[in-house]
Amino acid sequence: MLSLHADTSHVIQLAVGPAFMLAAIGGTLTILTNRLARVNDRTHKRREDRESADAGKQADIDAELKTLDRRARIINAAVCTGAGCAVIVCLLIGSLFIANELTIAFDRPVAVLFIAAMVALIGTYVLLVAEIFVAQHSINPT
């Protein structure tokens, strides 16, 4: 029968919070990639429309394409920040177990990793809100 040390079970308890955070990051990345796919589809459609449009419509389509490019850049930044956050959380969880097995006092590095993950997650959500703002403003430019 496999037995766990009391320390190992405590580390598992500590790792549960970041594991849930990792699940939330995965959901956020799914939302971001779906938004990016929609922007990409719309960009392809508008590029096709531009070929058959008259000069007046081309200017409107160019303005929309510029906005779509801006949205794509913001979403790409959010995806990169979110993926970086996920990597930091994985390092955090791994470091908890490694420090436990090597009996190293790893409190400060774990705290720094957690703070870095939270900053990256905040950045991801700020970028998501910025992209939503740009999308909303392009629909209703008032």
Image: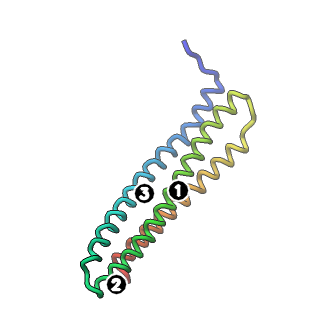
Q: Position of residue 40 (x, y in %)?
A: 36, 63
- Residue 110, compared with residue 69, is above or below; it is above
Which quadrant: the N terminus?
Answer: top right
Q: Earlier in the sequence, mark 3 or mark 1?
A: 3
Q: Position of residue 127 (x, y in %)?
A: 50, 64
- Residue 67, compared with residue 89, is above or below; it is below
Which quadrant: the C terminus?
Answer: bottom left
Is 68 left, or right, of 58 in this rendering? right
Residue 142's disc number: none
Asked whether disc 3 touches disc 1, contact meaning CB atoms under 8 Å apart, the reply is no
Q: What residue is at 38 percent from the left and 80 percent from the top?
A: 63
| Residue farthest along the bottom direction in this orientation | 56
Q: Quadrant of residue 51?
A: bottom left
Kindly identify the amino acid type of the residue bearing the numbered disc 3: Leu
Observer-side mark, 3 or 1, equals 1
Q: Which residue is mark 1?
A: 80
Q: What residue is at 63 percent from the left and 27 percent from the top?
A: 8
Label 2 sits on a secondary structure element that is helix
Q: Quadrant of residue 97?
A: top right
Is 38 left, or right, of 129 in this rendering? left
Q: Position of residue 135 (x, y in %)?
A: 39, 71
Residue 32's disc number: 3
What is the spatial separation of the Cα atoms under label 3 and label 2, in whole angstroms?
28 Å
Observer-side mark, 1 or 2, equals 2
- Residue 140, compared with residue 102, is above or below; it is below
Residue 59's disc number: 2
Q: What residue is at 37 percent from the left and 74 percent from the top?
A: 65
Q: Earlier in the sequence, mark 1 or mark 2?
A: 2
Q: Earlier in the sequence, mark 3 or mark 2?
A: 3
